[in-house]
Image: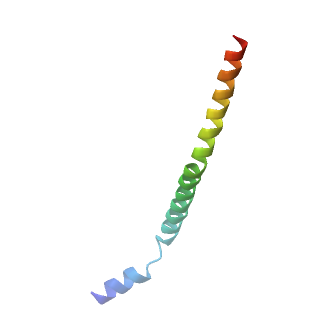
Amino acid sequence: MTSWIKAIWHDESAATAVEYGLIAAVLVIGLIGSLVFFASSTIGMWDGVSTRTQNAVEKKN
């Protein structure tokens, strides 16, 4: 049994896949974090554009 545990402990055949998975997870977390961070400023920008457009249309009429 101990030889089986040692064999699993020293097996590095899936290490690359695990590393790529961790890199992908970090990238996804960073992407979600940046989307959350920039969402409110982007919404505010488009709300401002909408308000200015509505005001311009109302002035023209």
Residue 55 percent location from the top left of the image? 67, 22
Who's the residue at 47% across and 72% down the image? 13
Taking 4 as reference, is 55 left or right?
A: right
Q: Nearer the viewer, residue 26 or 14?
A: 26
The image quadrant where one finds the N terminus is: bottom left
- Compared to residue 15, the image places residue 9 above or below, namely below
Who's the residue at 62% across and 41% down the image? 42
Report which quarter residue 41 is drawn in: top right
Who's the residue at 49% across and 72% down the image? 15
Q: How was this image coloured?
A: rainbow
Who's the residue at 71% across and 16% down the image? 59
Q: Nearer the viewer, residue 31 or 2?
A: 31
Question: Given the current orientation, which residue lies at the most extreme bottom position?
Answer: 2
Taking 52 as reference, is 7 left or right?
A: left
Question: Given the current orientation, which residue lies at the most extreme left position?
Answer: 1
Report which quarter residue 58 is drawn in: top right
